[in-house]
Image (cartoon, rainbow, N blue to C red):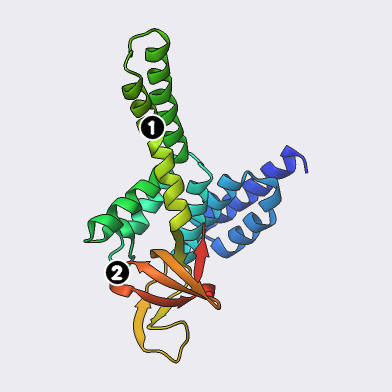
């Protein structure tokens, strides 16, 4: 479809947003999904759900926009607002240092990590090339350190899954509703999950809600 049609779809959604008709604006945005950049699509949709007060879908789509390296200040403002809500849980708000560090590290934009790695590696290689760095063991160590930010990110991606609670998720002692009910994680919360069993995921963080939740209550990004 042409750019003109895409512009019309965006303008229609924006007008509905201005008029306060968020449900219709969401429908228009969904209709334009294939015409929009995915980062912009998820940002617009997340912002609309946020205006409706639907924290679960809002956080999910905003996190999807962030994951696609969509760059717009209001994206970060919206996420900061969500995270500032007292009822919304997140690893970065955890009292446990490990959870907090994982949460903050995973929040770093991929573009930023790539730039840091590229600059560090280029500096090290130039130092070797122009004989500023003559100790090869030290050079090898610096190369390893240079690429370590991406190595850490890959390790976290392999060992942990991040998800948003789309709707209030009941936490159970085991992967079934027959087990003890530990309570509910509020929608809009971000969690780290581990084991998977028969449509159930085990919550690793927040630690206070360690237990099993149904896959259908989570949105992965």
Q: Residue at x 56, y 46 (%)?
A: 39
Front position among marks 1 and 2 = 1
In this orientation, which residue lies closer to the viewer: 148 or 53? Answer: 148
Q: Position of residue 26 (x, y in %)?
A: 59, 60
In this orientation, which residue lies closer to the viewer: 178 or 38? Answer: 178
In this orientation, which residue lies closer to the viewer: 81 or 121? Answer: 121
Q: Is residue 193 left or right of residue 14?
A: left
**Residue at the left extreme of this rendering:** 95
The residue carrying mark 1 is: 144
| SS type, badge 1 | helix
**Label 1 packing within 10 angstroms: few (<14), some (14-19), many (20+):** few
Q: Are marks 1 and 2 in contact (CB under 8 Å)?
A: no
Which mark is first along the chain, 2 or 1?
Answer: 1
Q: Name the quadrant containing residue 178.
A: bottom left
Name above or below for residue 27 compared with residue 187. above
Q: Residue at x 34, y 28 (%)?
A: 141
Is residue 82 visible to us here? yes
Q: Position of residue 154 (x, y in %)?
A: 46, 46
**Label 2 packing within 10 angstroms: few (<14), some (14-19), many (20+):** some
Q: Residue at x 48, y 68 (%)?
A: 166
Residue 169: mark: none
- Please state the total of marks drawn on the protein image: 2
The residue carrying mark 2 is: 207
Is residue 47 visible to us here? no
In which quadrant of the rendered image does the N terminus lie? top right
Q: CA distance from mark 1 to mark 2?
A: 33 Å
Q: Residue at x 43, y 66 (%)?
A: 194
């Amino acid at each position: 479809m042409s750019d003109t049609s895409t512009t019309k779809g965006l303008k229609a959604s924006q007008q509905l947003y201005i008029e306060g008709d968020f449900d219709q604006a969401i429908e228009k945005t969904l209709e334009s999904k294939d015409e929009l950049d995915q980062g912009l699509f998820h940002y617009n949709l997340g912002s609309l759900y946020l205006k409706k007060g639907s924290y679960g879908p809002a956080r999910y789509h905003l996190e999807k926009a962030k994951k696609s390296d969509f760059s717009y200040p209001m994206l970060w403002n919206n996420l900061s607002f969500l995270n500032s809500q007292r009822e919304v849980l997140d690893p970065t708000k955890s009292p446990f240092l490990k959870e907090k560090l994982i949460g903050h590290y995973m929040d770093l934009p991929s573009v930023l990590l790539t730039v840091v790695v590229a600059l560090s590696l280029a500096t090290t290689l130039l130092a070797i090339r122009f004989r500023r760095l003559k100790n090869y063991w030290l050079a090898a160590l610096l190369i390893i350190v240079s690429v370590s930010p991406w190595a850490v990110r890959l390790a976290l991606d392999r060992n942990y899954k991040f998800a948003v609670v789309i709707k209030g998720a009941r936490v159970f002692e085991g992967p079934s509703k027959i087990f003890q009910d530990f309570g509910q994680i509020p929608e809009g919360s971000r969690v780290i999950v581990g084991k998977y069993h028969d449509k159930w995921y085990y919550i690793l963080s927040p630690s206070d809600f360690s237990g099993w939740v149904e896959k259908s209550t989570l949105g992965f990004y």
